[in-house]
Amino acid sequence: MNELPHDSATERAVLGSLLYSPENYALVMDDLDLDLFHTPKNRTVFKALQNVVAKAEPSDQLVQAELNGLVDKPGLLIADLIHESALNTNLPQLVKYLQELKARRSALRTAHTLIERAQEKNDSETIYDVIDETQRSLLDIKESKMNLPTPVGAAMLNTAMTLKKRTEAGKLTALMTGYQALDELTNGFAPGELIIIAARPGMGKTAFFLQFLYELSLKGTTSLAYSLEMSTEQLALRLLSNISTVSHHSVMNSWLLKEREREKIENIVKDSKDLPLFIQEVPGLTAENVYNKTKRFMLAEKGLACIGIDHATRMGGGKKNGDNYHKFTEISRSLKDTALKLQIPVIALLQLNRGVEMRDDKRPQLRDLRDTGAWEEDADKILFLYRDSYYNKQSDDEYGAEVIVAKNRSGSCGTVNLLFRADCVRFYERVSNGNSK
């Protein structure tokens, strides 16, 4: 490989500024790392500075002591660096330039590795594995760019301008479920939020989730559903039943369909052809690659507004060893990071364990999540689904369904009463909604 891009003079100017004043180090410390420096001697000086900072307030005398025996005439070297730094006063800008050069070097190394691995014959990995890893590396390089704090005044001004644009456009960026009572309670699902929809099996998690995404698609909003449990065909059958209100049993056994029902389904299929709702079967989805897959999709399909994972409890963790608590904590943190980085709501469907059914009142509670990682801590909104008629066949509310908003960082908590038709797995809003807060 040819000489990698670098600028030794800028590296020296940054080192001199850091040595000249401890305040300078504090100014850019979060954006400094050893790989910013390419020249061996400059790397040695920065490593010595790091060692000093780890133990005490940085000073040129302590750094000189660290450098003794590592470089010739360390005192003279430090004096030269400090002198050179006087010619360059904009330290953050210099660090930003070194970040750019570091990214270029990383990109070139990644490209070189791709060429080598693409030419090798390796039975343990396919070329698609190599491409996935390369894309992940390139995305990591992009995400590592310098991120300086924003003054609160600038943040407020930017927010005010965003709100003004929304008002002028007559729409909100938060995604509404379509259930008025629920939307009033939650204020919708906003960009950057991690939303948990959790329940025991049979409560309608997948139906609630798919119905929400389908309604979004009718408004032209793009969404992506990752499925770790059901095939694309199974989900499509559920959607057809949900939208047509034809029983799921009849849709699956098409010979049972009446002519009117068949025509209804055919029209739905025709109308759904170009809807921006995408489903991807990913039985091996992990905390490590959910961000990369979504980012790639966003590059291909402009305007992605929401993703969901059904079921997130089936996701794999990045680490081979470790208990379920730590695995699920890694997953929840990864999904929250994805929501923040991509500025979209991320919806995770969770299946609660049997402990819920050991109680007289089988409504889920926040404590039901506490043995499964940091879901409760990381989530912005937590919605539990509950249907009394599932457990109590003599229930007075045969079609009743409850959406229990147990956590809500941007609104109120409470219970919203909906209706649920099990035959076509579809939720409806009650005409008179008796909600409790």
Image: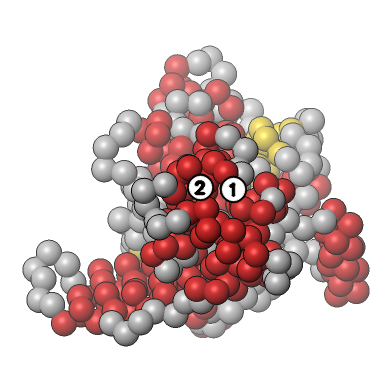
Circle 1 residue: 60
Image location (x, y in percent) of residue 267 = 53, 79
Image location (x, y in percent) of residue 117 = 20, 75
Q: Is residue 282 visible?
A: yes
Q: Amino acid at mark 1?
A: Asp
Report the Cα–Cα distance between label 1 and label 2.
6 Å
- 77 is higher (above) or lower (below) than 22: below
Measuring 50% from the left and 26% from the top, which residue is drawn there?
370
Circle 2 residue: 64
Way the structure is coloured: secondary structure
Count of numbered tags? 2
Snapshot quadrant of residue 238: bottom left
Measuring 54% from the left and 68% from the top, which residue is drawn there?
11
Q: Secondary structure at mark 1?
A: helix
Q: Residues within 10 Å of mark 2 (few under 14, many from 20)?
A: many
Q: Secondary structure at mark 2?
A: helix
